[in-house]
Image (cartoon, grey):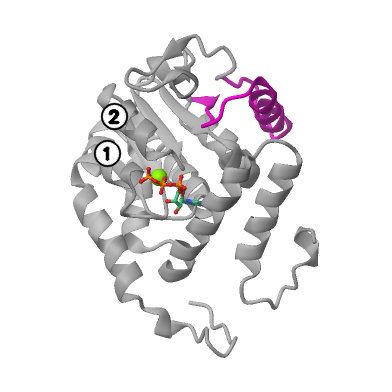
């Protein structure tokens, strides 16, 4: 079943499209099998969030944009799920904030690294980092520690959508300002990030890019004020409260009827 075969009327249309893109990613050799499991986990949280960008996530996305614009060297890290789901948005975001795109995967194989880099180039990337792997993040074992010396190793601000908990921790221990996109507000990745974005990457990355375009000409003082005002604890609490408390009654899910916001 391809993208186009999901009927427009299907209540889980967007979610099914996303799932099919992950499947296609696996078939193309850019997404790992574990990526399928991560996707399933993400879907469950997204369902409970109402499959929308909640207000606290939009605030986090604006703060993320401000951080990336203020950075000396911002880098957007890309794994197999990110490459499958939002290749154009990642390339566009890096362009807007004048940063690098670096491939970084949990189970590093040359084949998959190259497949992801090629995929990003097919979606407009001119330079893709990560293939050299000539530096390491301290505190991680071998394959998972490898980064580029002139990429993530040199970055002051990194956007790591869907990073695993260990690496998220190691990156922030290495002194990087870390922006994480993760639908689980309780995950170690979200709780260690300077800016936890609890939103689906299919909405988050384009929205961070859109905030960045909006703020591109803003004075540094304004960007600094946005960064300063952002409260990570409050954002995590708001996301958890939405998931647990749920305002799902706005959508009649049980009878298959779907009223949009
Ligand atoms: P920890 O971070 O505590 O080490 P983990 O939750 O990262 O553990 P994984 O199996 O790697 O363990 O989970 C993948 C994470 O990615 C989940 O938290 C899931 O909610 C999140 N996720 C998956 N798909 C998406 C997506 N499209 N957008 C945002 N987050 C996603
Ligand atoms: Mg995680």
Residue 194 - label: 1
What residue is drawn where x is 32% and y is 53%? Answer: 59
Residue 99: percent from left, percent from top: 48, 25
Instruction: Rate crowding at label 1 as few (under 14), some (14 to 19) or many (20 or more) other CA atoms within 10 Å.
Output: many
**Magenta stretch holds residue 126:** yes
The answer to whether residue 107 is above or below residue 152 is: below
Tell me the element at label 1: loop
Tell me the element at label 2: helix
Can residue 200 be seen here? The reply is: yes
Instruction: Rate crowding at label 2 as few (under 14), some (14 to 19) or many (20 or more) other CA atoms within 10 Å.
Output: some
Q: Residue furthest bottom?
A: 255
Residue 60: percent from left, percent from top: 33, 49
**Magenta stretch holds residue 195:** no
Quarter of the rendering containing residue 103: top right
Residue 114: percent from left, percent from top: 68, 23
- Quarter of the image containing the N terminus? bottom right
Range covered by the magenta-colored residues = 100-129
């Amino acid at each position: 079943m391809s993208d186009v075969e999901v009927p427009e009327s299907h209540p889980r249309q967007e979610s099914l499209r996303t799932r099919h893109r992950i499947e296609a990613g696996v078939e193309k050799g850019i997404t790992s099998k574990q990526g399928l499991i991560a996707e399933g986990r993400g879907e469950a949280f997204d369902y409970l969030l109402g499959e929308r960008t909640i207000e606290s996530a939009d605030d986090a996305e604006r703060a993320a944009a401000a951080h990336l614009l203020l950075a000396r060297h911002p880098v957007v890290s890309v794994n197999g799920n990110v490459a499958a789901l939002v290749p154009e948005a990642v390339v566009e975001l890096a362009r807007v904030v004048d940063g690098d795109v670096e491939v970084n995967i949990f189970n590093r194989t040359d084949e998959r690294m190259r497949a992801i880099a090629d995929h990003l180039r097919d979606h407009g990337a001119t330079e893709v980092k990560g293939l050299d792997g000539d530096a390491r993040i301290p505190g991680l074992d071998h394959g998972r520690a490898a980064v580029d010396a002139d990429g993530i190793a040199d970055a002051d601000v990194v956007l790591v959508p869907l990073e695993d908990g260990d690496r998220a921790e190691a990156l922030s221990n290495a002194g990087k300002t870390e922006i994480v996109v993760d639908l689980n507000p309780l995950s170690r990745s979200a709780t260690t990030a300077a800016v936890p974005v609890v939103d689906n990457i299919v909405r988050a990355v384009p929205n961070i890019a859109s905030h960045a375009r909006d703020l591109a000409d803003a004075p540094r003082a304004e960007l600094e004020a946005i960064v300063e005002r952002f409260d990570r604890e409050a954002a995590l609490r708001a996301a958890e409260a939405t998931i647990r408390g749920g305002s799902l009654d706005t959508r009649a899910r049980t009878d298959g009827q779907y009223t949009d916001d």
